[in-house]
Amino acid sequence: MQNYNLAQLELPTVMGEQFKELPDDLFIPPNALEICLESFSGPLDLLLYLIRKENIDILELDVSNITDQYLEYIELMDSLKFELAADYLVMAATLAEIKSRLMLPKESFDDEEEDPRASLIKRLQEYKRFKTISEKIAILPRVDRDFFIASAKAPKFEEPYNSEVIISKEELFSVISEVINRPNYKSSHLIDFEELSTKERIQILLDLLKKTNIISFSKTLKQPEGKKGVVVTLLASLELAKDGYIELIQNKSEELFIKSIRSI
Amino acid sequence: MNTEILNSVEALLFGSGRPMRLSEIKNTLENTGLVTELSEIKQAINNLEERYLNTSLEIQEVASGFRLQIKQKHSASLSILWNEKSPRVSKALMETISIIAYKQPVTRGDIEDIRGITVSTRIIRSLLERNWIKVSGNKDVPGRPALYVTTKDFLNDLNLKNISDLPELPEREEVEEKNLLTQAV
């Protein structure tokens, strides 16, 4: 049914030598080689190609035959790891549906029901119109491909460069000294972070509590540490309270007291 | 014919490297103190065309006006000189621009209906970058898809003056449903 004609294949020439026979180890089926060489712009393009190859009119579309060929092509593309657009698969499903409907006995066609192929044929015909015209437009003379515009090149309007700039030594000196004395914005500044470690603070608090059983929070603070010192001390006390070493007591007064639990 | 006008028009066309309308030529010349009529400029262009008969140059009227070109028979040597080829245009792109040209304004969906395949963003972007198409508005349907039309540049690039200068779209073949049915089985 599929009359692939090997003689129509254009055999490639490799390093000046023409291949007379297809290599045995070529895994692409020979009848597919021809198809592969073409690139299709879509499933309708592929269908038109298959129809043209059979040398039949669109109206005489043999869906059964075309579907087989179409699926063969899709499988081949898949095996070659070509990424196929989903639209190709949609077309495969459409063809399969038409094919199955055509296989029903003729009597089962309702009088009102149209030929299952009609919609596909219409789409093919419409697509063919635009495919034909696009091929005509593609060969129309196109700028920069088939013809060129005559034009004087626009001049480069650059700032005129005057090589004979006269500069006095005083001017030169003032420029140089200005450059030398320019503040050095590039020098990097290193910002030192004062490290206050909570761990260390816990130890300090424990040492303090060894001497005295209870101490007011404010007395554990050191003036130069400022707010950060308060935060770290508070964190340290909370940590100790959580682990059950100390008790934090705040009576009616504002003052917070740290009381050692162990030593009691 | 006043050679001054003739040469001034030639200089403008040669220098601009793009199509110029008669009115633009007239206005530019007026700014240099050369007052003319549109008819005089048209006459100048006709005279230039005559002058160019035996040269490598020609004047082509395209959608955006008159343009000075190198005759097509010299393109081969220029291609060698510049050693550059204009980017190849894919089949898919040509199909897309053709559908837009004959059915404009169209949405992507309209193009996809005819081509039977998703229109890639790459193609639309490429056409927009070439300035062959532009968005003319949005279709008043859900999603408000962009409507595309061809531009003057598209016609300019193909040496055309009007959209009607494009080749004629083949007639739609009528499908007779009854005929189909008899052949169907």
Image (cartoon, grey):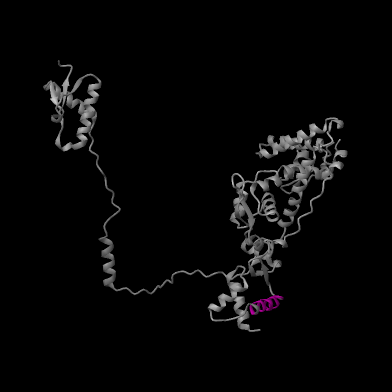
User: Please, which residue is most extreme toward the left here?
Assistant: A211
Q: Quadrant of the N terminus of chain B?
A: bottom right
Can you tell which quarter of the image residue B24 is in?
Answer: bottom right
Question: Is B51 inside the magenta-drawn segment?
Answer: yes
Front one among A39 and A46: A46
Taking the view exactly as shown, the residue that stands out farthest to the right is B182
Answer whether residue A248 is visible to the viewer in this image. yes
- Specify the quadrant that holds the C terminus of chain B: top right
Residue at point 67% right, 45% down? B112
The number of discs equals: 0
**Looking at the image, which residue sits at the far bottom?**
B2
Q: Give the overall secondary structure of the magenta segment.
A: helix
Residue at coordinates 59% horizontally, 74% vertically from top-left? B25
Q: Position of residue B9 (x, y in %)?
A: 61, 77
Q: Is residue A193 left or right of residue A207?
A: right
Can you say whether B24 is above or below B129 in the image? below
Above-or-below relation of B163 to A256? below
In the image: residue B108, left or right of residue A234 = right
Is residue B37 found inside the magenta-colored segment of the image?
no
User: To which quarter of the image does residue B34 belong?
Assistant: bottom right
x then y, percent, for residue A255 = 15, 28
Question: Above or below — where is A82 with respect to A184?
Answer: above
Horizontal and vertical percent for residue A68? 78, 35
Visible residue check, residue A27 = no
Quadrant hosting residue B29: bottom right
Picture coordinates of residue A162, whole percent (x, y) = 40, 73
Q: Which residues are magenta?
A: B40-53
Q: Is residue A234 left or right of residue B30?
A: left
